[in-house]
Amino acid sequence: METAAISNTALMVIFGLVVGGGGAFTWSYMKTQRLEAEKRLHEALSLKSREAEQQLVFQGKAEALQQRSDLERELSERRSELTRVESRLEQREEDLHRQQQHVAQQEQSIASKQGVVDARAEELQETLVRQGRELERISSMTSEEARRYLMDKLHTELSQEQATMIRQMEQETRETSERKARSILSQAIQRCAVDHVCEAAVTVVSLPSDDMKGRIIGREGRNIRALEAATGVELIIDDTPEAVVISGFDPVRREIARIALETLVADGRISPTRIEEVVTRAKQEVEDRMKEDGEQAILDVGISGVHPEIIKLIGRLRYRTSYGQNILLHSKEVAYLAGIIAAELKADVDVAKRGALLHDIGKALTHTMDGTHTALGVEAARKYNESPRVIHAIEAHHNDVMPETVEAVIVQVADALSAARPGARREPLETHVKRMQKLEDIAKSFTGIERCFAIQAGREVRVMVAPDKVSDAEAAALARDIAKRIESEMTYPGQVKVTVIRESRNSEFAK
């Protein structure tokens, strides 16, 4: 057993030695192979490095040669450019030299000519002196006398030309001033003349006796001056028994002056201080009365939600008239008519009444602000938040803009009805009828007219023409000719619209 164990142990030792020797041999062989591989790799890398260095050197030499070639070419171009520049400079120097020679020659020529000119000037001066002496001998006049004669003659001619020019300028100025005056007057008439022409511009205040006139005038006129300054009107105290005339531009001021004067006369105490107190109370009384009138008008018409400032403007219309027609009463009448028409047409009655009552609201502002009553009314309505439909009705009631709503047309019709009915304004029925008839006669006097009608109280003339006699172009010219004829032959308030209608109809019969 022990021998067997020893044998096994020996075998194991031998096997271990064999395995260890084989492993050592393998490891030594692999190490040798690795070293050879590293050597070969190192040699390959060295070869590649030398090749790369050679290639870089070659590329560097090529680039250097290329740069040298480029520099030589650029240097050659610059030398050529310098050569050209030098040639141009030499050419310019030659040109300057030639010009200098030419200038020198011209200076010599001018100098020689100057001498000739000076000599001729001396000769001319001597000739003028001789001629002057000869003229004095022939005319028996000295040079001073001849100068005065010429000046007088020239002054006479200039005076005639000046007079002619003055006449022309006067004529032109007269024509220009007439045009401007007509323009200014037309604007003034549009704003104010309606109230002044048709409404009496004076108010008469009765006095208990003529002794009161002296107390109104006061010592050295201080009372009347204080009253006129406080109210803005003119007091006319003349020989009219027991009466004082109040003359003023603004009916509101006249009303304030009337109330104040009646109060002072009834009280008997008249002094500048007392006048100021009474006028202040009279102004407040008139303001309160206008507010009450505005509220009453709104209540009568049946509308609500009106701004307080609009109410005051409505009340102010009590003191405005147009052709003798009170504007407040006219506005209420237009509102009644507009409400009736709107109800019949199933339109908005409230908008129609509101637009009708406010359509002339701008006339309460025309005495204090610039612009037409339509523009001022639109501005006031927009400022106090009236609805767009009401504003449009105000703006369109005189065709400043074309009506776009039924209510705007209704306000137009109601306004025309209120203003056109006989007796509404200060125009007799016979005069009204004659004016309407003359409008139609003027239109009928042109050829090609079949029928014509004057409508809207003479504010519009509608003319129907024969289509086979009047063309479309001739219809436009016909409307213009009729309008010019009306302007030249008639006098009327506002404006007249001429509408020419040309209609063609074709008909056939089915048999």
Image: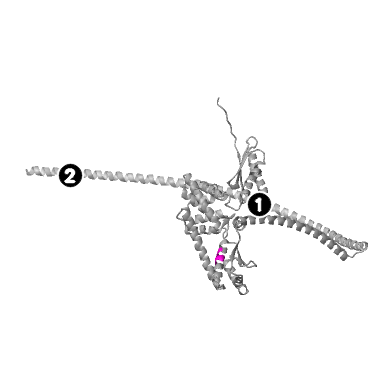
Q: Which residue is mark 2?
A: 16
> Does residue 395 appear to the left or right of 170 in the view shown?
left
- Above-or-below relation of 505 to 133: above
> Does residue 482 appear to the left or right of 137 in the view shown?
left
- Above-or-below relation of 475 to 284: above
Quadrant of the image for the N terminus?
Answer: top left
Residue 387's disc is none
Magenta region: 255-259
Numbered disc in front, either 1 or 2 = 1
Assess whether residue 237 is covered by the magenta stretch.
no
> Does residue 434 appear to the left or right of 171 in the view shown?
left
Q: Position of residue 463 (x, y in %)?
A: 62, 41
User: Where, by quadrant of the figure, is residue 442 drawn?
Assistant: top right
Task: Judge by depth and name the residue closer to the eye, 510 or 206.
Answer: 206
- Above-or-below relation of 455 to 111: above
Residue 85's disc is 1
Alpha carbons under labels 1 and 2: distance apart: 101 Å
Task: Judge by depth and name the residue closer to the eye, 476 or 123.
Answer: 476
